Image (cartoon, helix red, strand yellow):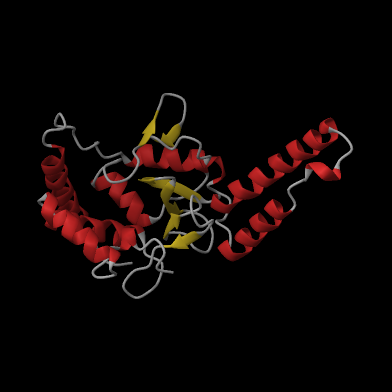
């Protein structure tokens, strides 16, 4: 793992947050968590967070660029996770080629009305199929935290269990039915630290709307694309 000066990252993150929150009511960067708080969250989810994400929580912020990890008085979870089920973080993140094949097979077995003698028989079979298909689809993201909402039904995931533990993935199922690793410059799945520091460096340089528009045009053309935006690079 690359050496990271997390105190410096905290200072850079705070400065960027202050700059970007001007005119938005001065929203403050969420405070860090204590070692005890992080351990309690890990105990609840039955995992140990990747070390770079742990350091981010302990020394930079409980939120910011990523969903905020917080305790609501009853349990720990990530704010805004919505329908995401984080109760199976201890279950290894699956091989995505095999998981995709299982998902496609399930959807290919969708019942057809013409194959059943009555509406009731069809509905009963359809309900059973739907429950099974949804379970298969949900299993594609076990062992991963929904760490960032990219909009339009897209999400960025941090894998915390299994062989791919510590890597960042893009959930593009809203359009392409795939989950892809976010690749670093060596064409390997990026770590949390690589993903975050790359984002931070790019964001620090974008100080005007014109710069941001020009940057996105370059990224769309495949020039200087940041790790977080390499959604389909794999």
From the viewer's perspective, is 40 left or right of 161? left
Q: Please tell me whether residue 134 is drawn above or below residue 190 in the rendered image.
A: above
Q: Position of residue 213 (x, y in %)?
A: 18, 55
Point 82% across, 32% down: residue: 119
Nearest the viewer among 108 and 148 is 108
Residue 23 at least partly seen:
yes
Determine whether, in the image, residue 111 is placed left or right of residue 223. right
Please tell me which residue lies in front, 23 or 15.
23
Q: Position of residue 65 (x, y in %)?
A: 28, 46
Question: Looking at this view, is 195 or 104 the one in front?
Answer: 104
Which one is nearer the viewer's eye here, 163 or 212? 212
Give how far across and how far down residue 166 sits, in percent: 42, 59
**Vertical position of residue 230 compared to residue 76: above or below:** below
Q: Is residue 5 visible?
A: no
Which quarter shows the C terminus? Answer: bottom left
Instruction: Determine the residue located farthest toward the bottom in the rendered image.
Output: 186
Q: Residue at x 17, y 60 (%)?
A: 214
Q: Is residue 37 above or below residue 6?
A: above
Residue lying furthest right: 117
Quadrant where the N terminus is found in the figure:
bottom left
Find residue 101 and report its image quarter. Answer: bottom right
Q: Which corner quadrant of the image does residue 6 belong to?
A: bottom left
Residue 69 placement: quadrant: top left
Query: Residue lying farthest front?
Result: 114
**Figure disc tally:** 0
Place of residue 171 in the rendered image (x, y in percent of width and height, measured from the top left): 46, 53
Residue found 70% across the figure and 57% down from its top? 105
């Amino acid at each position: 793992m690359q050496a990271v000066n997390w105190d410096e990252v905290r200072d850079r993150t705070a400065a960027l947050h202050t700059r970007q929150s001007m005119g938005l009511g001065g929203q403050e960067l969420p405070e860090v968590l204590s070692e005890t708080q992080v351990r309690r969250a890990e105990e609840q989810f039955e995992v140990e967070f990747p070390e770079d994400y742990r350091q981010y929580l302990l020394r930079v912020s409980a939120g910011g660029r990523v969903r905020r990890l917080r305790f609501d008085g009853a349990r720990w979870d990530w704010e805004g996770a919505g329908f995401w089920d984080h109760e199976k973080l201890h279950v290894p993140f699956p091989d995505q080629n095999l998981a995709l094949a299982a998902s496609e097979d399930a959807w290919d077995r969708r019942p057809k009305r013409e194959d059943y003698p009555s509406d009731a028989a069809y509905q009963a079979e359809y309900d059973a199929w739907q429950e099974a298909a949804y379970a298969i689809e949900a299993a594609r993201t076990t062992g991963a935290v929904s760490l960032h909402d990219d909009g339009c039904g897209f999400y960025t995931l941090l894998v915390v269990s299994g062989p791919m533990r510590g890597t960042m993935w893009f959930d593009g199922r809203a359009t392409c039915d795939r989950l892809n690793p976010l690749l670093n410059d060596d064409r390997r799945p990026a770590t949390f630290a690589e993903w975050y520091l790359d984002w931070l460096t790019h964001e620090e340089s974008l100080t005007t709307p014109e710069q941001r528009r020009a940057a996105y045009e370059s990224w769309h053309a495949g020039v200087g694309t940041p790790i977080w935006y390499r959604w389909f690079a794999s």
